[in-house]
Amino acid sequence: MSTTKNIALLLWICLASAQNFSKTILVGKNQPVKSIKEALEICVNGDVIKVEGGFYSENNLAINKQISLIGIDYPTISGKKKEGIFLIRANNVSIEGFHFADAGVSFVKDNAAIRLDSVSGCVIKNNRFSNNFFGIYIGKSWDCIISENKIISNQKAQTYSGNGIHLWYCRNVQVEKNYVEGHRD
């Protein structure tokens, strides 16, 4: 085999096997990684972030990589009644097993606990939402699944509440087995 072919074969093997080196990042008060923000900064495509039960006061968290977030014992992530919590801008993101609370009211930004923006293949499943302006806001997205979530708003007036699950300019989004109460729609 020629040197060029050997180098090409070696490069192909390295690239193919690099995709199989995804890691699991543990987040918790007794873990080396203490915040979800830090985990999002160090993760790469294909990683799994597992967040231990507890309270995390974090907002405006951007997800720009194809990852899975898994909550252990429904950790609470609070938007501090000021901002949105997660903004997903990567395809194939999965979020399961969290409690999202207190995404702030904003009629300009449409704050949401989870906002999907121009993505495909995302799964939002088996989460709990309380006291958020919008629970799940999906815009310009396709081929996503929103399933088995419990979304409750404590707003007394519908004018101060967004929708539990809001889809705008989407296609092929499966919305199934969700419970929504107290939101505008």
Image: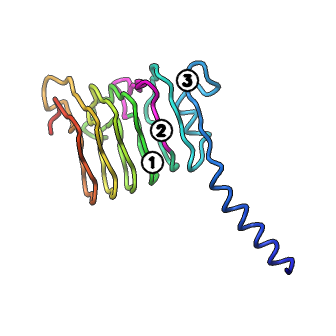
Colour scheme in use: rainbow
Quarter of the figure with the N terminus: bottom right
Mark 1 / mark 2, whichever is N-terminal: 2
Query: Who's the residue at 36% across and 47% down the image?
Result: 116
Quarter of the figure with the C terminus: top left
Tag 3 residue: 28
Q: Position of residue 60 (x, y in %)?
A: 44, 35
Mark 1 / mark 3, whichever is N-terminal: 3
- Give how far apart the Cα atoms at labels 1 and 3 are: 21 Å
Query: For residue 93, which numbered disc appears in the image?
Result: 1
Tell me if 34 is positioned left or right of 142 in this view: right
> Which residues are the magenta region?
68-84
The picture quadrant where one finds residue 28 is top right
- For the residue pair 159 and 91, the one nearer the viewer reads as 91
- Give how far apart the Cα atoms at labels 2 and 3 are: 13 Å
Q: The residue tagged with tag 1: helix, strand or loop? A: loop
Q: Amino acid at mark 3?
A: Gly
Q: Residues within 10 Å of mark 3 (few under 14, many from 20)?
A: some
Tell me if 83 is positioned left or right of 160 in this view: right
Q: Amino acid at mark 2?
A: Leu
Tag 2 residue: 69
Query: Who's the residue at 15% across and 36% down the image?
Result: 184
Q: Position of residue 120 (x, y in %)?
A: 39, 57
Q: Residues within 10 Å of mark 1 (few under 14, many from 20)?
A: many
